[in-house]
């Protein structure tokens, strides 16, 4: 304002972050899929068997009936749940069901990872993106602290990328990798390389990996081949893929010549269990995700602002309103920060 002395304040911006998933950090967080009942007992047994805690556990959620149990188990075991949301159905109440599910998760003030519904080539990319954004907004409305995954699945990358939404709606990308036999590992690396090449400097990457397969020649399970693939894959992630920030071992078994998948059984095999235990023994594979929950990053702007300049202040206020930030004045500093974590 004219005639008033300038008062210059330095601007800081405080933003909620999930620091461990940022690209610059060294190491990979480990996780395992988890299905069915008695989840806490299964987790306790698994972590005893592998002599290491997991950072993540992956859950498919079709309905909300187990959410309380999963959330309480996550808190008590100090692990972070990854919830894979169900694909869109023809039912008119699909989004109501999703919202109900998210509200159940949001009842707990605890970090969660949400994997969005997998794209469907029967749906136009524009329709998928519209639905994706709607679910994204529901997540932000109902869950206090979340990491959101866009899933590439296990299909062709070049088809999946057509469904990729705006970057602002994605924190992390994921892909599914299943080695059906040891020779199939070439496909595993080709697919990972394609996603990696396009996202290594853009988004952190989570790989859901499974190496429990059978020998199609005589319909027996190739346990040594699976063990070899596990060892090689985790070694390769450590040496060659620094932008991969988490690997979730999908503890499944495929039934020959059927579409049936048996969950929670692969690591029951002693040879596969020992191979997995050895593969994640390196300190590169981390499990202390909980200690980084609710980290904050402070960004400092070099320029200062004159709080007696109406034009400058209006611009700041408009920016804060757009971001849903609050403005705090302290010791000739202005802190603009999220009013909530939503």
Image (cartoon, grey):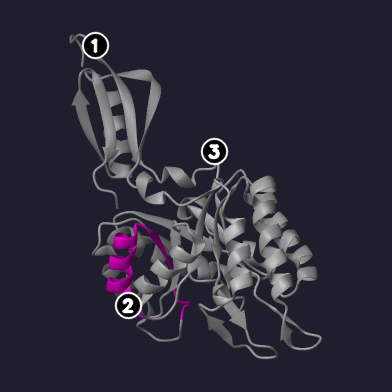
Dot in front, 3 or 1: 3
State the image coordinates of residue 316 (x, y, percent, origin top left).
Answer: 30, 31
Q: CA distance from mark 3 to mark 1?
A: 40 Å
Residue at image position (52%, 70%) is 128
Residue at image position (63%, 64%) is 275
Rendered image quadrant of residue 270: bottom right
Q: Residue furthest bottom?
A: 258
Q: Which of 323/339 is in front?
A: 339
Q: Earlier in the sequence, mark 3 or mark 1?
A: 1
Label pair 3/1, CB-CB below 8 angstroms: no
The residue that disc 1 covers is: 6
Residue at image position (35%, 71%) is 40
Q: Which of 122/289 is in front?
A: 289
Q: Is residue 204 above or below residue 277?
A: above
Q: Earlier in the sequence, mark 1 or mark 2?
A: 1
Q: Secondary structure at mark 1?
A: loop
Would you say residue 81 sits in the magenta stretch? Answer: yes
Q: Which mark is residue 66?
A: 2
Q: Secondary structure at mark 3?
A: loop
Q: Is residue 152 above or below residue 323?
A: below
State the image coordinates of residue 31 (x, y, percent, origin top left).
Answer: 49, 61
> Is residue 161 left or right of 340 when viewed as pictured?
right
Q: Is residue 311 above or below residue 263?
A: above
Residue stretch in magenta: 63-88
The residue that disc 3 covers is: 24
User: Would you call the spot at circle 3 few (<14 residues within 10 Å), some (14-19), or many (20 or more)?
Assistant: few
């Amino acid at each position: 304002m004219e005639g008033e002395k300038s008062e210059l304040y330095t601007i800081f911006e405080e933003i909620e972050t999930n620091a461990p998933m940022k690209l610059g950090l060294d190491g990979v967080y480990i996780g395992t899929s988890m299905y069915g009942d008695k989840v806490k007992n299964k987790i306790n047994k698994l972590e005893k068997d592998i002599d290491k805690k997991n950072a993540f556990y992956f859950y498919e959620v079709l309905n909300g009936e187990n959410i309380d149990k999963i959330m309480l188990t996550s808190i008590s075991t100090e692990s972070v749940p990854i919830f894979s949301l169900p694909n869109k159905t023809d039912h008119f109440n699909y989004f109501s069901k999703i919202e109900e599910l998210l509200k159940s998760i949001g009842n707990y003030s605890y970090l969660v990872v949400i994997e969005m519904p997998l794209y469907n080539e029967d749906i136009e990319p524009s329709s998928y993106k519209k639905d994706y954004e709607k679910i994204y907004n529901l997540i932000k409305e109902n869950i206090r602290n979340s990491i959101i995954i866009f899933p590439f699945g296990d299909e062709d990358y070049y088809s999946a990328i057509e469904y990729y939404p705006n970057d602002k709606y994605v924190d992390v990308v994921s892909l599914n990798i299943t080695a059906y036999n040891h020779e199939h590992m070439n496909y595993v690396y080709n697919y990972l390389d394609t996603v990696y090449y396009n996202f290594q400097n853009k988004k952190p990457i989570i790989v859901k990996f499974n190496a429990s397969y059978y020998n199609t020649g005589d319909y027996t399970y190739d346990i040594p081949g699976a063990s070899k693939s596990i060892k090689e894959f985790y070694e390769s992630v450590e040496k060659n893929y620094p932008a991969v920030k988490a690997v979730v071992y999908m503890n499944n078994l495929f039934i020959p010549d059927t579409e049936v998948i048996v969950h929670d059984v692969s690591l029951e095999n002693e040879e596969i269990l020992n191979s997995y235990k050895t593969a994640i023994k390196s300190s590169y594979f981390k499990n202390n995700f909980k200690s980084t929950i609710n980290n904050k990053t402070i960004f400092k702007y070099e320029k200062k602002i004159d709080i007696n300049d109406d034009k400058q202040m209006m611009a700041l206020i408009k920016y804060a309103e757009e971001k849903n930030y609050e403005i705090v004045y302290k010791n000739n500093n202005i802190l603009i920060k999220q009013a909530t974590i939503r």
